[in-house]
Image: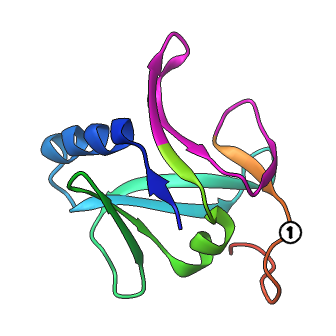
Amino acid sequence: MISLSDKAAIALQDLARENPRGDGLRLAVEKGGCAGLQYAMTIDFTKAEDLVVEHLGSKVFVDPESALILGESILDYEDGLAGAGFRIRNPNAVRSCGCGTSFEPGAVPSGESGHG
């Protein structure tokens, strides 16, 4: 199951105060990017089928198909010279692009061919 770092949870709290369009962050995997798949993040409301992860009062929603690819990923937040933003540390990614949002997954669980 995906987890949130303390820094990511605090950044999500700040984001939620600034953007009251939802009650958490939707994290998804979609086709695209230079490595085959890419991460998508939006402020949204939970849906019945979502996996909901809560930490320090912040919520992240992941659809079941994306959850298969994200596995034991960690959502972190970095604020450094290279810029500030959420970063996903995905142990299922065998290759990542320099952009930081595009990746190539390792073996997808049987019966799945990727996110569509």
Residue at image x 68%, y 75%? Answer: 116
**Magenta span: chief secondary structure:** strand
Residue furthest to the top: 81
Q: Position of residue 35 (x, y in %)?
A: 81, 47
Q: Position of residue 25 (x, y in %)?
A: 35, 57
**Is 89 located above or below residue 28 in the figure?**
above
Residue at image x 49%, y 47%? Answer: 75
Image mark count: 1
24 sits to left or right of 50: left
Residue 97 location, quadrant? top right
Q: Is residue 85 magenta?
A: yes
Residue at image x 63%, y 42%? Answer: 101
101 sits to left or right of 6: right
**Colour basis:** rainbow
Q: Amino acid at mark 1?
A: Ala
Residue at image x 19%, y 57%? Answer: 21
Q: Position of residue 14 (x, y in %)?
A: 20, 38
**Is 15 located above or below residue 109 in the figure?**
above
Q: Is residue 17 magenta?
A: no
Q: Magenta span covers which residues?
A: 76-100
Label 1 Cα crowd, 10 Å radius (few <14 / some 14-19 / many 20+): few
Residue 58 location, quadrant? bottom left
Q: Position of residue 27 (x, y in %)?
A: 47, 59
**Is 2 located above or below residue 109 in the figure?**
above
Helix, strand or loop at label 1? It is: loop
Q: Which residue is mark 1?
A: 107
